[in-house]
Amino acid sequence: MDSANIVIVGGGVVGCALARELAAKWDDVFLLEKMPHVGMAASTRNSGVIHSGIYYTPGSLKARLCVRGNRILHEYCAAHGVPHRPCGKLVIAASDAERPSLEKLLETGRGNGVEGLRIVDRAAARSREPNIQCVAALEVPSSGILSAEDLVKALAREAAERGASVVTRASVKRLDPGASGIRVEVEIGDPADPSGMQREAIEARCVINCAGLFSDDVAAMLGNKRYRIYPNRGEYCEVVKNKSNLVRNLVYPVPHDAGFTLGVHLTKTVWGTLLVGPTSDHIQDKNDYESNRHPVEEFVRRAKPMLPALAVEDLHLAYSGIRAKLLPPGQGGMADFIITHDPEVRRAVHLVGIESPGLTASLAIAEYVRSLVDEVLN
């Protein structure tokens, strides 16, 4: 049986950031990802936005780690050749009734230490985004856009260069805590070829549960059933190429459902394409990306108040992603990240409900978790 200092369960952007961070200090770090490649789920099925920190309750983990993550992620992308654009964004008030929401975002953002925020009038907003309809907008200069896939690849590559073992097609089947470690039973191989599957075991001094949508299931393997993930699907449309210049950068509405979602927004990607989305719908199956997709007409209905020139023929369905929500259907608000030791199995650290701004905060989350791992290994 192999032994390890650290086993990270889940190879999304946060898992890869953790492997990179922890391998710089400890030997024998294993990153286990059940998919054929790292970052194939929520990490790359999103808007690719580098968030600023204007939405989150002051003092919360989301607020602190997003603001810190924003700065160091911009630096990381520049240093490692990850395609990105520090373009800023506009959050718009479509009517006078939404102006107080802009004021609240301004106050929250400043309370979180977000710099450069200001509310501008319609003329100033239109000078940045000529095709947008609004009465006022919040300028957020520290927001940006990146290639999430390239970020994940860069983090995984650097983790491996620092000595971490990045193992894909590795599904954790069982966790058994003992006096000196946690036995991790792993099934390795392609499920489509059962004859090639292998069962392995690793004795880990510390296990980090970073399994995204399945983090509640991994916690339950240790007997911890206090967490529950409610999968929430977000769908996107892409604007046809000859209309992609309708928006120059990032345009958001004020948040919906008391902050439960940020609403359907307009995203100009690093490749020059224009996305409309995501929607927000709770689903039953954590792997259901395609059933009962919204029609194109629904995206136009939601986006047209911001972008009047948008028409049904300008859109086609794109990809979807699934968020790891901690709040059930019908409950508004925004839950904070859960990043903590397991109360019964102190050698385990859980990261649960790591949805947006998890991409932005990934490097800062890794710094934060390093101190928890230090408590276990030292």
Image (cartoon, rainbow, N blue to C red):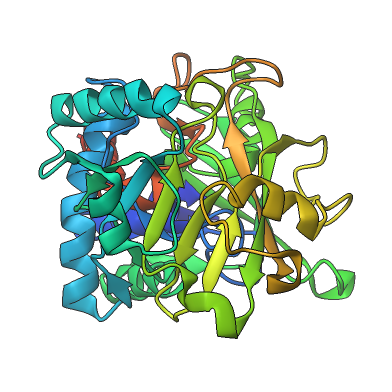
> Is 110 in front, or is 240?
240
Residue 363 x/y as whole percent: 27, 52
> Is 195 in front, or is 178?
195
Q: Is residue 29 visible?
A: no
Q: In the displayed structure, would residue 241 be above or below residue 86?
A: below
> Is 186 in front, or is 8?
8
> Is 336 in front, or is 89?
89
In the rendered view of the protein, which quadrant contains the N terminus?
bottom right
For the point 49% across and 57% down, the residue is 266
> Seen in the image, is 80 located left or right of residue 317?
left
In the rendered view of the protein, which quadrant contains the C terminus?
top left
Q: How many numbered tags mark residues here?
A: 0
> Seen in the image, is 95 located left or right of residue 124?
right
Q: Is residue 232 visible?
A: yes
For the point 39% across and 76% down, the residue is 270
> Seen in the image, is 158 located left or right of residue 169?
left
Q: In the displayed structure, would residue 295 be above or below residue 168?
A: above
> Seen in the image, is 317 located left or right of residue 38?
right
The residue positioned farthest toward the bottom in the image shown: 242
Residue 371 x/y as whole percent: 21, 35
The image quarter in which residue 27 lies: bottom left
Residue 311 x/y as whole percent: 69, 65
Q: In the displayed structure, would residue 67 be above or below residue 158?
A: above
For the point 59% across and 59% down, the residue is 276
Residue 143 x/y as whole percent: 27, 53
For the point 64% across and 79% down, the residue is 240
